[in-house]
Image: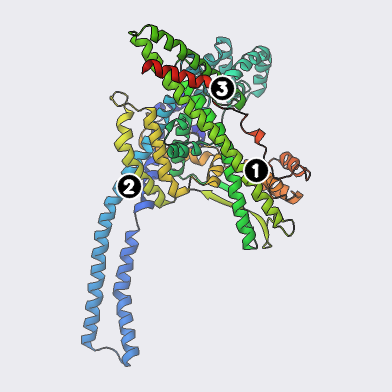
Amino acid sequence: MGFHLFRSRHAFEHEHRSRPSARIRLERDGHAHIRRMAAAIESVPWTNTLLSLLWFGGPVTIAGALGGYYLGYGHLPTMGNLIFFFFFAVLTGASGIASTILNNYRRAGRYRRATQRIARVMSALPDIIHATRNLSVEGLEGEARQREAATLLLRRPDLSPAGLELAAQELLGDETHARLLVDIDVYRRQGLFARIQDLYDEHHDTLSAQLSALDELAPEAASLLRDRFQGRAPQLYDGVPRPPNFIENILAAIEEDDDLLMTMKDVEAMLVLAFELINGRELPTLMFEYKGQWRRARMLDTLERARSRYRIAQATGLSRLRALSSYLAEQEDTLVEDTPVGLRSDVLLERTREAMNDLALRIHQQADHAESHRHDIETRQQLRTSARTLSNAMRLFKHMRHGYEQTGRHHAQLLRLSERWDRHSEDTPRLHLKGTRPGLRIREDSIALDDHDKATFHRQLLAFLDADVLPRLNRETPRAFTADTAKRLAIEIAVILEPMVHLSHPEVQRAIYATHAADFSPIEPHLSGASKAALGAALVSEVRDDLSRSAESLALALVRHYRIELEDDTIDFLHRHYGARRNMLTLVSKHDERQRRPVSLLSQGLPSIGPPSRLWYRALVRARQVLG
């Protein structure tokens, strides 16, 4: 299965036209996957239950009665007693068999309904993911829309030569280099990397200039295109990075009752996470635990929670800055055109402030024109739209400032708890990799849904899909699938998953962010539900669990917050078992005592954002005066 997923779309379609058995096999695998999930949720081995009833209701009951009678009275029962025991055994056995048959008849109905629910959810979620990506592109305009669409194409591992040429043409506007990329991809598929190097060296100067210019506008697209020109294509087992802090953004939107706090990228990430979990994805986690005195163990738990909250808070301010930038990019006639993927925080802040200043100045101009031309309805409508855009942007700006202030408070709390940990340390604790001695240990765990959770998820989500989502997916209907609908769906999924995997817990969020999501781009909308289920399960199994980032993070926490030296055996263990980079671990271990103070620099977070500009307030007041 995995081999076919790497092929180009052209090869995939050709194979399915020339080999109908491949499509039939995919359908059969999908139906089998759905039946296994439904069986694990609803079905029971009723034949075993029936045999058990026959055995215990017949021979076992009679033998027990005879043995008990003999032990109690010292002789075998009379004929009348034998008739009683026999009739009792037959009646109870027959009643048990009848109730089992009736119960399994009812279970068969539940099994069929469970199968239908699973098949519908498996078929609907990939289509909704595609619709959400389309909404992300639809919110942009002009060249920004072209760049975003081309970036989505370049992420596909099985992108055809025609798709590569189209993406390069959209991003570079150069037919020569677009055709060059097709030639490089042909050589890549044949493993001729020496020839790829020849072509890349031949066009290096002009390519570097074009990619550097693209890097200023769309860093992610430039990085993907640069890899393609060097003969490197995305691989399914690597997965795709998750948007930073997407869970916290959705939870913040629920808490603040403001869906502007989440972007369409956050919505897509939540949909992908849900589809992964119902397809059996287990997300590995690494965390500390303390074995020894219960007071020290409780202090460690408190310190770990504070560290997780601080890291989430660090990402919250930047995520809200990205939400503000995304919102401005989706509005008409603003200076922000591209989605804020891959841009530094200081660049994002500068661009958003410039865009909001420009919008405020435009509101003053529109207000002056509307005041002098009171019957110009179009100008008043433009003024109303601009004022609403600036008002929403200011609300997001205030949320961003609040998130940055929260970072400072969590940072101060983390420092207090770190100092408390040091004060109550009789001696320097050690990290024990094995044995039962008191001290810190690394504990492995996983985030996954069990069969009961999957049944609950399918049932609750399908009720929401039927009521509010599936009728909108057909673009021909008056109620089309919109960004508001997608955001409501993401909120619903977060609410359903919360009691199952505890998404609101900082350590759970940190573990999810440390993993890469499965790449579901090979699942195309025209496929059947069974094919989507089979491909979904195969793509989830393709993703390689990478704990290197988590291990490096734990090593840094050991040195910074717990002031534990990284010994050679610890470095070897983290490198060998989790793939942590040895040079990074060595660099962390060589911090001196002054550098290993329990401090996480706030300078690594957001730049100083300052208060909202008075120009923005004056523009809104001026618009309100004119509009009344």
* Residue that appears at 55% across and 21% down: 353
Is 245 positioned to the left or the right of 275 in the image?
right
Which residue position holds label 3? 221
**Mark 2 to mark 3 CA distance (whole Å):** 42 Å
- Vertical placement of residue 232 versus 438, above or below: above
- Which residue type carries mark 2? Ala
Q: Does dot 2 land on a helix, a strand or a loop?
A: helix
Give the residue at x 44% y 20%: 621
Front in this rendered view, residue 514 or 546: 514
- Can you see residue 291? yes
Q: Mark 3 near mark 1, Cβ–Cβ under 8 Å? A: no
Quadrant where the C terminus sits is top left
Which label lies toward us, 3 or 1?
Answer: 1
Q: How crowded is mark 3: few (under 14 residues within 10 Å), some or many (20 or more)?
A: many
Q: Position of residue 77 (x, y in %)?
A: 27, 88
Image x and y of residue 420, in percent: 67, 53
Q: What element carries label 3?
A: helix
Q: What residue type is labelled 3?
A: Ala
Q: Can residue 27 be seen in this view?
A: no
Judging by the rendered image, the residue that carries numbered circle 1 is 553
Q: Where is residue 594 shown, x and y percent of the image?
A: 77, 43
Q: Regarding mark 1 in the picture, which secondary structure is present there?
A: helix
Which residue was labeled with disc 2? 114
Q: Around disc 1, counting alpha carbons within 10 Å, would you say few (fewer than 14), some (14 to 19), or many (20 or more)?
A: some
N-term mark: 1 or 2: 2
Q: Identify which amino acid the numbered label 1 is placed on.
A: Ser
Compared across the picture, whether 369 is left or right of 314 comes to left
Q: Earlier in the sequence, mark 3 or mark 1?
A: 3
Residue at (56%, 29%) from the top-left corner?
234
